[in-house]
Amino acid sequence: MPANEAYITGVGQSEVGVKLTRLPLLLTLDAVREALSEAGLTIGQIDGVSTYPGRMAMMPGFSPVGADELIDALGIRATWHAGAMETSSQLGAVVAAAMAVRIGQARHVICFRTVYEAAALARPTEYPPLRRETVDGYSQWFAPFNAISAANWTAQYAMRHVKRFGLTREQLAQIALTDRANAVLNPRALVRKPLTMDEYLSARMISTPLCLYDCDRFTDASTVLIVSAGGAIGEVSCTPIRIAAMAGTVERHSWDQAEWMACYPTGTDLWKRTDYKPTDVDTAQLYDGFSFQALAWLEALGFCGVGEGGQFIEGGKRIALNGELPLNTFGGQIGAGRLHGFGFAHEAVVQLRGRGGARQIPGDPRVAVCASGGGPLATALLLARD
């Protein structure tokens, strides 16, 4: 293995649920243990930790565990660590780890994302959100217009596709229907019940054209990826998955929304950094905090033209488990739970190793793309089993 390459080795995931009582640090440790076991590594071999966005006291459910806490809890002798929101979305933590191992700052880095939003909302006395008397930070650009939720921002992009490109609700529904169909086959998925078109079309609207089933839901869970240096691959016992290319974009939060979501320039940049092409991809695991974001990623990554996403997924066959581009095979965030970006990279590795069980895609998948972020932030990873 080339020493200057970065690989995902162990992957792990805790219990996924709503209003869990197991503490978020313990969920993180559960996921770490699973990842270490799969990789065949010990905690003494870990010398780096990377997370997004780091512990946030003002939003304790959104990010209750930081890199420092994990280092302390496990006694890690870290030569490098990182954790902050100032990066190109959630999987930016994996990008940072990959760059660290490529330049020799670390050999094996634990990357994690822990969310505890459902439990925190249920137990506000234990996880009190910070109350502000004034509007400041980037919220100053949204709160005065009552655009508090990302659903409001995403819906504007989706409505442009409705008006300019003819996107229909029946077309958009295929993201949610596909997610839910795949979640049925995932024993860890949050919602293991299929969704019908009639149920989708009759659901209450959230922010037109997005309805209830176009949105993910708060979840409690932790997901871990171990990023290892090429020169250290001899220490692991699992099949290494190479990070073949990475790309990310940060657009502005302030003033007006950017004309196009950050996934569009990110998708273009990804293919400039590899010899692979969209036609080489065997499965796509694409961020779907809201269903339209996954559709936008399909366009951004060149699987179809801009404005053609609705026609590309129409009927759902092309993105089904046995289709030409299986999408979000673990159920995505709409079906499997809001793992906040890391679930997509976890599933890409599972599929490339042929360990998907009932949801394993047919054939011998060797190349996957995974992505996180919507709106002003975006990260894409191209993963390959060499």
Image: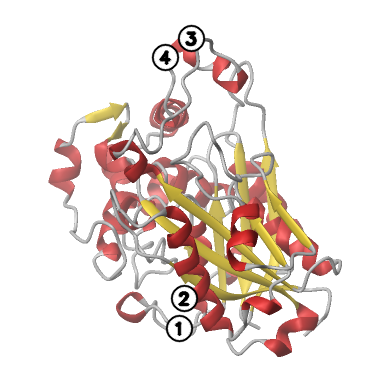
Spatial CA distance of label 2 from label 3 is: 44 Å
Q: Nearer the viewer, mark 2 or mark 3?
A: 3
Amino acid bearing label 1: Gly
Q: What element carries label 2?
A: helix
Q: What element carries label 3?
A: helix
In the image, what residue occupies the spot 72% across and 84% down? 233
| Mark 1: few/some/many CA within 10 Å (<14, 14-19, 20+) | some
68 left or right, relative to 152: right
Q: Earlier in the sequence, mark 2 or mark 3?
A: 3
99 versus 309 height, above or below: below
Q: Which of marks 4 and 1 is nearer the N terminus?
A: 4
Q: Which of marks 4 and 1 is in front?
A: 4
Q: Disc 4 designates what residue?
A: 146
205 versus 83 height, above or below: above
Q: Do the residues labelled 2 and 3 touch (CB within 8 Å)?
A: no
Q: Earlier in the sequence, mark 2 or mark 4?
A: 4
Of 42 and 103, the residue lying toward us: 42
Q: Disc 2 designates what residue?
A: 351
Q: Disc 3 designates what residue?
A: 144
Residue 104 locus on image (x, y percent): 85, 69
Spatial CA distance of label 2 from label 4 is: 41 Å
173 versus 385 height, above or below: above
| Mark 2: few/some/many CA within 10 Å (<14, 14-19, 20+) | many
User: Looking at this rendering, what residue extends furthest in the right direction?
Assistant: 103
Residue 227 locus on image (x, y percent): 66, 70
Q: Are marks 1 and 2 in contact (CB under 8 Å)?
A: yes
In the image, what residue occupies the spot 22% across and 61% down? 192
Q: Is mark 4 on a helix, strand or loop?
A: loop
Q: Disc 1 designates what residue?
A: 354
Spatial CA distance of label 1 from label 2 is: 5 Å
